[in-house]
Image: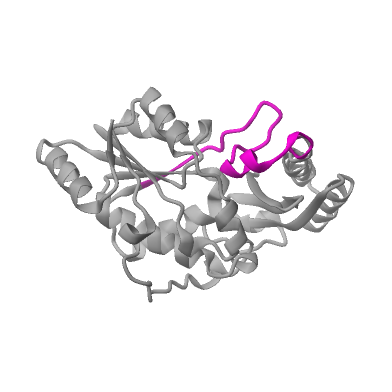
Amino acid sequence: MEIFNQIAPLKAFIHAQKQRGKSIGLVPTMGALHAGHLSLIEASKKENSITVCSIFVNPTQFNNPADLLKYPRTFDKDTLLLEKVECDAVFYPDNAEMYPETSLIKFDFSHLDKVMEGKFRPGHFSGVALVVSKLFHIVEPDHAYFGQKDWQQFAVIRQLSEELKFNLKLHSEPTSREQDGLAMSSRNLRLNEQQREQAIVFFRALSAAKTILLSGKSISEAKNLVKEIIEQQPGTILEYFEVADSKNLNLLENVKDSNRPIMCIAGFIGEIRLIDNMFLD
């Protein structure tokens, strides 16, 4: 497995592979890898000759400096995991390589980045779009893979890719979960034992909301149920629960107004913020 810290050698490696007619898959990550990330690597390996995993804790997508400082960084462990699944190359740049000067560019995705995550994390998706644009230009992948857990991010990147005419195919892979339903997340590493037990409340709330929505209850009733479930769990705070159209992210008042609705939730276990979602399929 090749490890690159600089853009130029990585681009030379990619160019040589493409000269040989090999396809390139990209899995962008911020490290602290878990089984969900590895499933993205495996999905890429099935469809591409060469799989590149990027590991970069992108500062421009953190609107909370404390959150950036506390984000888990486990590069040595990450490389061992990537070697086990036979990833071909890792791009592990530092901030100076990705942002040699302070970036002046800001992205605005209209309503896509004003609801849910965008509402509570202003500027977050501008930073995501900036770093993903850089990665797409650097790696020039044929395919790029993202997890469903960050569905709003995927919707934003899909818009970015369509409007800027990136010549690649995007893939959203199903959320990987622990046995008790907790969505796998790098932030789970920060949970202590008690918080880890509490964290499944978001999955329980989504599952309960799905059950009553599919039985014909209203979104308003589902919101009340979710609020009640979260409030019954000590140490947890609900930030939002919304039902949205999975393509345009318009918030719904009736599930019948969308061909494929998605429920999205975010909240805190102590000071640790977690998100999750679930389709109403």
In percent of width and height, residue 221 lies at 84, 54
Q: Is residue 211 above or below residue 247?
A: above
Residue 40 visible, this orientation: yes
Relative horizontal placement of residue 65, taking residue 135 as reference (left or right): right
Single out the residue that lies furthest toward the left.
Answer: 19
Residue at horizontal 57 percent and vertical 45 percent from the top:
149
Residue at horizontal 72 percent and vertical 40 percent from the top:
203
Q: How is the image coloured?
A: one colour
In percent of width and height, residue 200 lies at 74, 38
Relative horizontal placement of residue 132, taking residue 12 as reference (left or right): right
Residue at horizontal 51 percent and vertical 55 percent from the top:
153
Single out the residue that lies furthest toward the top.
Answer: 84
Q: Residue 233: which quarter of the image?
A: top right
Q: Who is closer to the viewer here, 128 or 81?
A: 81
Question: Which image quadrant: the C terminus?
Answer: top right
In percent of width and height, residue 126 lies at 47, 67
- The span shown in magenta is 170-196
Q: Is residue 176 above or below residue 142?
A: above
Relative horizontal placement of residue 59, taking residue 67 as reference (left or right): left
Q: Who is closer to the viewer here, 255 or 265?
A: 265
Question: Which image quadrant: the N terminus?
Answer: top left
In percent of width and height, residue 41 lies at 39, 33
Magenta stretch contains residue 9? no
Residue 281 visible, this orientation: no
